[in-house]
Amino acid sequence: MRLVELKCESFRSLSKVDFRPQPGINVIRGYNAQGKTTVLEALFFLATSRSHRTTVEKDLVQEGKEGFHARALVQRHDRAVTVEASWWRNVKRFKVNGVPQTRMSDILGKIGVVMSSPEDVGLVKGSGSQRRQFLDMALSQVLPRYLNALQHYRQVLKQRNQLLRNPHAEAALLDVWDEQLATHGAVLIEERTKYLDQLDKLARVGYAQIAEEERLDLRYQPDVTSPEMLAGVLQQARNSDLLRGTTQRGPHRDDFEFIIAGRAARSFASQGQQRTAALAVKLADVELIHQRTGDYPLLLLDEILSELDEKRAGRLFTHLHQGVQCFLTTANMTNTIPSGGHTVAVYRISGGRIEEE
């Protein structure tokens, strides 16, 4: 997949941008608060319908404006796709190839994207919710079946929890919610199991090539180990759930762990090891998206050179497949980028405007 053109108007600091990147590595240089990360944020928003920096969409509108518009044209291996997003007076709208879209499932996957930033260290040492969010985004981009099950699971979970807080909850109605929760939850367990098995193998190779040190393993920690067990587990936990007013068992409690050299990375790994492990997982996700869709996603690397020494940065780009179009932001205005054999185009951003060097 290749981004042919990105246009933004009044999106945060991007007053009016018409960005036509090159294949390979596109470096966006700029001092702080000039809009480097905002370019990546606009791409992420067009691909996922949300920002990676805020849940308040009004914050995406440039100060003094009433709305924004963003548009991306990408060339996939078999077709061109245009995605447009606009926000005007608290209303968000999306179009794909000019056709209005009303559901998230109509948008996800049209532009494949994987983002890595210094905050990804939280993927290793943060809460389980961060890792579940990563799994859900990764799988929802490539598996409509998973996205459909996830959306239904969340809706049913909300309804079940509301019923559990009702002192007069009917057992028959709980039976209905349990059956649906087990049906949709089984899909989540099944697909997460397969995905993490593949991710584990690819991330191990990537970590070894970038870090050239200890072994990385990913260990899935499902709350319920088998899809077939979920219905029985929900039934067994019902009395306890009624006492607490919430659903305590199920894939909404899943997690996975990073293991480096046989030890839990969140407790024993250095900051550098944790960051490299998180990056290796993101690169593995890039490869898995390619395997499942036939297209490499756009790779968005926000200020990662500040987290890697020169040798590791060089090994990162050497490891990266030549078919990946990469967008790299950096505040370093002079250093040469270790390209790893990729073609490199360098752009400078200032005051929300991009110019090729």
Image (cartoon, rainbow, N blue to C red):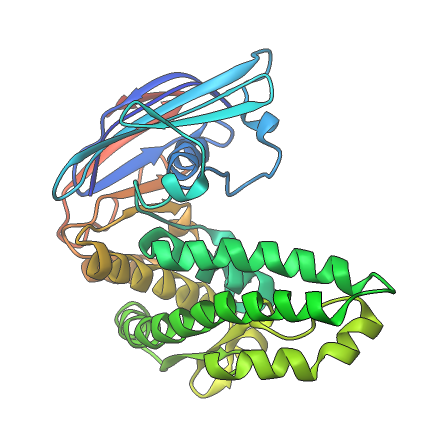
- 184 displayed left or right of 18: right
- 16 displayed left or right of 265: left
Measuring from the top left, give residue 147's x and y in whole percent.
42, 54
Find residue 261 and report its image quarter. Answer: bottom left
Is residue 250 at all visible to an observer of this figure?
A: yes
- 75 displayed left or right of 101: left
- 147 displayed left or right of 23: right
Q: Is residue 78 above or below residue 72?
A: below
Measuring from the top left, give residue 288's x and y in whole percent.
27, 62
Measuring from the top left, give residue 112's x and y in whole percent.
30, 46
Q: Is residue 328 above or below residue 176?
A: above
Question: Which quarter of the rendered picture does the N terminus lie within?
Answer: top left
Q: Give the number of marks.
A: 0
Is residue 226 at all visible to an observer of this figure?
A: no
Identity of the residue drawn at 69% across and 73% down: 248
Find residue 345 and report its image quarter. Answer: top left
Q: Is residue 354 above or below residue 246?
A: above
Identity of the residue drawn at 74% across and 72% down: 171
Measuring from the top left, give residue 111's x and y in whole percent.
30, 41
Residue 306 versus residue 151: which sits nearer the camera? 151
